[in-house]
């Protein structure tokens, strides 16, 4: 297992290197931030001074090598707009995105697995059919439209929940968290549900399909033939086996929630990394965009590694395959 983890870490380092090249070239080849950062009334001498200060007077390959050298020491560049380290801006916004993503995934898991399990165990019941119909709506409705409807109903019409912002925060371990205050939870409720809706529908359909498939397997039929209670058959035999693909999907979807919460953060003015990315793209703040994308790639790599380790813990056959591969 140790050899397997080392191989995955080496492959992850190569992936990060390739992605840094693609992201850097892709971002730095588009637009010219000088047009936005320098006043049109500035003279030629002033423009050349600013361009040299930003390092934009060098060829692209040279800019990349300088970026790579600094990145190895943890420096992903300074923001053109704020003149502060790009990674510092992202880390300051990360807690807001993390708590939004975690809340969305908790909603999706807490509702999606039980509802999907029920729909799989009793597929012909009216409630199961209603659950599946609701999951289709969750897939079909655009995130931005659902967000606007939530604001119109719960904020404008009923006045129960605030429509924008993060609310009151408290400091814990040096980080500001809004989930620890009532005002913060009220601000979090709508964006978290809006972000969870697609994942909730996905987990319902995946759990239902896995349950229906597991019920036809011989080990479940044997357990039922032994006279075990249905609750024990589901809890011990069905749920344990269907959790393997579900854990994999949850891990991958958590990564996508972190990376693509941009629409939800924009609609609810949630001060997370997604909103920072949108603001940075608007002013062509290249270092922040590159740093954001590399942080997201790193998160995906880490989450995939974590999912593989959990996967091997749930399925002994995966552990054996790793041991044989390690020789």
Image (cartoon, rainbow, N blue to C red):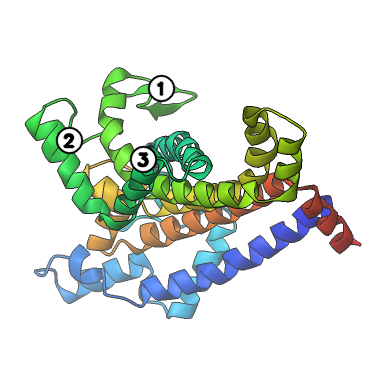
Q: Is residue 171 above or below residue 300?
A: above
Relative image position of residue 309 (x, y in whole percent): 70, 47
Q: Earlier in the sequence, mark 1 or mark 3?
A: 3
**Which labelled disc corresponds to residue 281?**
none
Q: Callout 2: 10 Å neighbours few (<14), some, many (20+)?
A: many
Q: Quadrant of the C terminus?
A: bottom right
Image: 191 above or below 324? above
Report x, y in % for residue 36: 19, 66
The residue that mark 1 highlights is 171
Q: Residue 163 has which mark?
A: 2
Foreground residue among 236 and 148: 236
Q: Residue furthest top?
A: 182
- Closer to the camera, 11 or 287? 11
Earlier-in-chain disc, 2 versus 1: 2
Which one is in front, 79 or 173? Answer: 173
Drawn side of residue 318 relative to residue 272, left or right: right
In x, y percent, where is residue 168? 28, 23
């Amino acid at each position: 297992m140790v050899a397997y983890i080392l191989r995955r870490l080496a492959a992850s380092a190569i992936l990060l290197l390739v992605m840094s090249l693609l992201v850097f070239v892709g971002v730095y080849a588009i637009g010219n931030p000088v047009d936005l950062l320098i006043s049109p009334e500035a003279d030629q001498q002033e423009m050349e001074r600013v361009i040299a200060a930003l390092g934009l007077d060098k060829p692209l390959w040279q800019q990349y090598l300088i970026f790579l050298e600094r990145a190895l020491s943890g420096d992903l560049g300074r923001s053109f707009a704020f003149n502060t380290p790009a990674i510092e801006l992202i880390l300051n916004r990360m807690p807001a995105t993390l708590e939004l993503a975690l809340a969305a995934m908790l909603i999706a898991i807490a509702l999606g697995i039980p509802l999907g399990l029920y729909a799989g165990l009793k597929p012909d019941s009216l409630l199961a059919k209603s659950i599946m119909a609701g999951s289709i709506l969750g897939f079909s409705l655009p995130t931005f439209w659902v967000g606007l409807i939530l604001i119109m109903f719960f904020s404008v019409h009923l006045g129960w929940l605030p429509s924008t912002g993060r609310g009151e925060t408290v400091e814990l371990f040096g980080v500001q968290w809004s989930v620890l205050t009532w005002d913060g939870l009220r601000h979090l409720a709508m964006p978290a549900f809006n972000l969870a809706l697609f994942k909730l529908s996905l987990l319902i359909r995946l759990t239902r399909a896995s349950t229906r498939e597991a019920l036809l397997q011989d080990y479940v039929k044997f357990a039922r033939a032994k006279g075990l209670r249905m609750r024990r058959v589901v809890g011990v035999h069905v749920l344990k086996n269907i959790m393997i693909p579900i854990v994999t999907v949850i891990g991958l979807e958590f990564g996508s929630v972190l990376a693509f919460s941009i629409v939800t953060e924009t609609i609810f003015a949630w001060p997370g990394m997604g909103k920072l990315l949108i603001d940075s793209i608007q002013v062509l703040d290249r270092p922040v965009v590159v740093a954001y994308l590399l942080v997201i790639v790193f998160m995906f790599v880490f989450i995939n590694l974590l999912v593989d380790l959990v996967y091997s813990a749930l399925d002994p056959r995966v552990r054996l395959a790793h041991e044989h591969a390690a020789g």
